Image: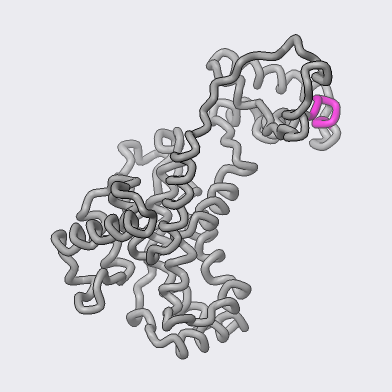
C-alpha cells in the first residue's frame, strides 16, 4: 500500500471545501483526486489501528502490506490482501458522493475535519468490522483450509441451516456437504471451539413476566450470574457517555489513544502531525511536543470529569 504524495496542504476554507466536495461528488476527476489526498493520512493511520486488531493468524501466513508493519522473516510468503482492501474500503467510505454531498462546513469545519470526525466515529469502526469479518463472525484459518467452500458452510451452519438446504444453496451434493460439515464440527470440537457455531440469539422480553406455570419447560431452568451493574454505576456510565459526546473530536482521539489503547506519546504525536491536527490554535501540529500533549490530555480528562459530574474518570 504505497502512500501517494500530497501535492498541497489540505484546504481549510469551508466555502472552498464545499465547492471541492460538490465537484468531487459530481464526478470531477481532479476534485476526487484532491479529496482522496486529504483523506489519505487518516486512512493510513486507521488501517494501522484496525487491521492488527483482527489480524489473527494471518501474520504468520502472509506478508503484511501496511507501511508501519515489520517485514516478514519469510519473504516467500504471499502478500496479505486485507491492508490494501481496508484502504480501499475506507477511501470509498470517506469519499463516496453521498457522503460528500452531506458536507456543509458547519461551524467553520473543513473537509478534512469532517472526514476526521467520520473516520474516528464508532459507526465507521463497526461498519469496517462488519465488512472485514463478514457477518461479524471470523472463520478460523484451519476451517478455511479444509475445503474451498468450508467458510460458506461454516456461516450456514452458524445460521442453523441443515445440510440439505446448504447443498441446495451451493449447488453441491448433499453427501459432500454433510461430510464437510461433520469435519468442521470435529475440528472445532477437537480445538474446544465448537461454540463458534452458536448462532446469534434473541430473547423475548415478554417471557420474563411469565409465572412458573406458564413456563414451556421448567426442566432446564438454571441460575444465571447477575452481571448487570448497580443502578448508581449505570447512572455514572450514562453520564460519562453523554459527556464523552460533548468532547471535541481531537479530545476524543487523544483520550482514546492514550488512555484506552495506551499508545505511546510519540505515536500519538506522530499521528497528530500526520493528520495536521493541532492541539491549540496557537501551536501548529508539527510543533506540538510531549509536554503540550500531556497538558492537553490532563485538561481533556478534567473536562470529561466536569461534564459528567464525576470526580475521577
The residue at 27%/48% (across/down) is 263
Question: Vertical placement of 256 versus 133: above or below?
Answer: below
Q: Is residue 200 covered in magenta? A: no
Query: Where's residue 29, x and y in %?
Result: 54, 82
Q: Which residues are magenta?
A: 161-167
Question: Vertical placement of 164 versus 190: above or below?
Answer: below
In the picture provided, is 193 more to the left or to the right than 14?
right
The residue at 46%/73% (across/down) is 114
Secondary structure character of the magenta stretch overall: helix
Query: Where's residue 313, x and y in %?
Result: 32, 47
In the picture provided, is 126 more to the left or to the right than 48?
right
Residue 149 in view (yes/no)? no
Query: Where's residue 89, x and y in %?
Result: 54, 59
Query: Where's residue 132, x and y in %?
Result: 55, 47
Q: How many marks?
A: 0
In the picture provided, is 6 more to the left or to the right than 218?
left
* The one of 1 and 134 positioned closer to us in this rendering: 134
Residue sitting at the far top = 219
Residue 305 occupies quadrant: bottom left
Amino acid at each position: 500500500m504505497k502512500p501517494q504524495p500530497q501535492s498541497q496542504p489540505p484546504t481549510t476554507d469551508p466555502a472552498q471545501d464545499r465547492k471541492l466536495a460538490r465537484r468531487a461528488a459530481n464526478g470531477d476527476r481532479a476534485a476526487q483526486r484532491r479529496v482522496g489526498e486529504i483523506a489519505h493520512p487518516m486512512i493510513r493511520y486507521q488501517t494501522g489501528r484496525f487491521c492488527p486488531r483482527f489480524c489473527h493468524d494471518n501474520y504468520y501466513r502472509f506478508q503484511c502490506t501496511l507501511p508501519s508493519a515489520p517485514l516478514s522473516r519469510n519473504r516467500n510468503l504471499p502478500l496479505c490482501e486485507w491492508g490494501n482492501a481496508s484502504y480501499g474500503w475506507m477511501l470509498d467510505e470517506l469519499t463516496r458522493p453521498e457522503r460528500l454531498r452531506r458536507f456543509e462546513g458547519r461551524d467553520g469545519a473543513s473537509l478534512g475535519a469532517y472526514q476526521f470526525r467520520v473516520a474516528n466515529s464508532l459507526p465507521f469502526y463497526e461498519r469496517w468490522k462488519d465488512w472485514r469479518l463478514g457477518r461479524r463472525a471470523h472463520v478460523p484459518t484451519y476451517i478455511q483450509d479444509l475445503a474451498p467452500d468450508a467458510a460458506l458452510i461454516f456461516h450456514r451452519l452458524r445460521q442453523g441451516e441443515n445440510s440439505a438446504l446448504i447443498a441446495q444453496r451451493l449447488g453441491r451434493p448433499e453427501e459432500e456437504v454433510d461430510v464437510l460439515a461433520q469435519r468442521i464440527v470435529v475440528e472445532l470440537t477437537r480445538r474446544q471451539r465448537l461454540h463458534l457455531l452458536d448462532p446469534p440469539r434473541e430473547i423475548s422480553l415478554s417471557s420474563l413476566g411469565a409465572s412458573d406455570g406458564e413456563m414451556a419447560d421448567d426442566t432446564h431452568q438454571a441460575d444465571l450470574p447477575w452481571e448487570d451493574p448497580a443502578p448508581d454505576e449505570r447512572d455514572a456510565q450514562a453520564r460519562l457517555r453523554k459527556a464523552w459526546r460533548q468532547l471535541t473530536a481531537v479530545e476524543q482521539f487523544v483520550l482514546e489513544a492514550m488512555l484506552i489503547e495506551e499508545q505511546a506519546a510519540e505515536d500519538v504525536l506522530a499521528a497528530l502531525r500526520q493528520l495536521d491536527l493541532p492541539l491549540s490554535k496557537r501551536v501548529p501540529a508539527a510543533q506540538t511536543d510531549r509536554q503540550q500533549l500531556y497538558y492537553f490530555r490532563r485538561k481533556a480528562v478534567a473536562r470529561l470529569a466536569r461534564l459528567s459530574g464525576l470526580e475521577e474518570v
